[in-house]
Image: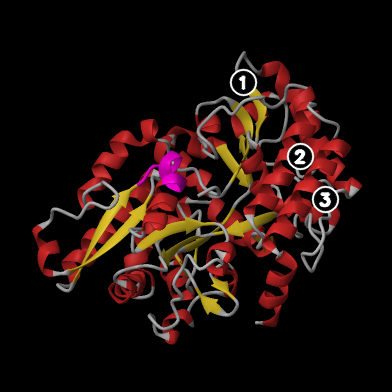
Amino acid sequence: MRRRTLLTTAAAGLTAASLAACGSGTPGQKAEDSRAKSRTNVEFWGSVFTTPENAWYKKVVEDFNDAQEDVFVNYTVVPADAWDQKLKAAQAAGNAPDMYIKSGRLDTDARTGLLKPLDDLIEAKVFDEITDQAKEVSQYQGKWFGFPLLLEPQVTLLWDKDLFEKAGLDPEKPPTTWHEMFQACEKIAPLLKNGQFCVGTAGDPDTFGWTTVAAQQHVAGHLPVSDDWSKADAMDPKYEDLIGFYKTLQENKWMPRQPLGAGNSAQPLGEGKVAMLSQGSWAMSEIAADYPDKVKTTGMAPWVQNDGDLETSISTIGNMKWLIDAKSKEPEATATFFTWALGGDPEVLKPFFVDTQFTKAPARQKVTDVVNKDPKSKDAPWSSVVFEDIVPFCVPESQYPFDINAALGDAIQSGMTGEASPKDALKKANTEIQKVIDREDLAKAHKEMESK
């Protein structure tokens, strides 16, 4: 679950406890609700997201269990720091949940047989409503392996308007280029106290790996693999420029050496630790829910680009999708929940998008139409930024194994901090990427994917 901020065990304790009321709260343990005894049980694993998302997941499960008498969904919360370990262990033992939530691409999981295709479980007319962008990240070789809940830009620029004004900057005009960001930092830095920084960005190789995919495409015109996935292509000097951007922020102490908050959270901006933040569109939902006093003084815009072109590859666009495990004991029953919650009445989904402050794009046009009619949309000016200024110019997440993203992310991190020169860091990444290509026989996988 690398794309989104999911809380760690300690941070999520109270929230997880409240959500566990939907079911047992313990992976693999059956629900204690008396209704479960007379129904087909579906095990659903999720994690901890923003406050309004958590509330919606709890309610949609409760509403489904109340709406019919054949299926009982047992919703279990697994905090992010335990997610990979628990899911892999459960899959290896053959007792994985029937369904779970996934962010990012599903291609590798589908290719390696971890997921069950949905085409024979859900009527085709239900999938017909899904938007083209959502289809892109929910299908593999022409088959549906995930049912998308939403689409959201993974990188945007948030800034503190008050700090901009105090620094003599126009609070309504954020930087659009790398150079303009450097200029803004020069003016903001003298106003900052100890522990405050101009910019908050990714803080670890994995996060750099996926948050910079669009930037990699933007600066070099390609990703760090050849078009046919047969060779690594990470040594383009233009990638050195990308590393140089972060290196400049680091060397001038405009960005912290260590993360100031949990993963990709809006916490650093909400707590006044940074003047600008690189974050997904969900950050405004977090600001509105957890730092309401900051809403009026927080702006959102496309993330800065090397050339200021904000209409080409400005962000990757990802989504949260629901998946059925390949070894699900109750795939048909699970599919009825998918259809009811995600493919049925738009009113079921409307609270999710309204309560998350219009920071996400629905995966179905009918849902979009209902959400846009809600009067509260007028109180969320950033919604037009998300839907009009960012979403149309996003690119899909990379389809190859995440190890390739991680290798490029490691190069950015080591080159940025001075552990290696940008050129040497990219040379190492190129070697690691080629190992992944050869190990996974990605040229063959790409050929098969293209043939579909």
Which numbered disc, 2 or 1, marks the residue closer to the eye?
2
| Quarter that holds the C terminus | bottom right
Residue in the image at 81% along x and 48% along y: 430
Q: Position of residue 212 (x, y in %)?
A: 70, 47
Residue positioned 63% across, 35% down in the render: 204
Give the residue number, with chain letter if any, for mark 1. Answer: 196
Is label 3 in a helix, a strand or a loop? loop
Residue sitting at 88 percent across and 38 percent down? Answer: 423
Inspect the magenta stretch and tell me whether residue 80 lies in it: yes
Mark 2 or 1, nearer chain start: 1
Q: Which residue is mark 3?
A: 234
Q: Report the span colored magenta.
A: 78-85
Q: CA distance from mark 1 to mark 3?
A: 34 Å
Residue sitting at x 67%, y 54%:
315
Badge 1 marks a residue whose secondary structure is loop
Q: Is residue 225 placed above or below 275 in the rendered structure?
A: below
What residue sits right under mark 2 in the picture? Answer: 411
Q: Residues within 10 Å of mark 1 (few under 14, many from 20)?
A: many
The single residue placed furthest to the top in the displayed view is 194
**Which of disc 3 and disc 1 is earlier in sequence?**
1
Tags 2 and 1 touching, CB below 8 Å: no
Badges 3 and 2: C-beta atoms under 8 Å apart? yes
Horizontal and vertical percent position of residue 273: 57, 25
Q: Quadrant of residue 101?
A: bottom left
Q: Amino acid at mark 1?
A: Gln
On the rendered structure, is 276 left or right of 333? right
Residue 62, placed above or below residue 77: below
Inspect the image, locate mark 2, and give the three-letter code of the amino acid beneath it.
Ala
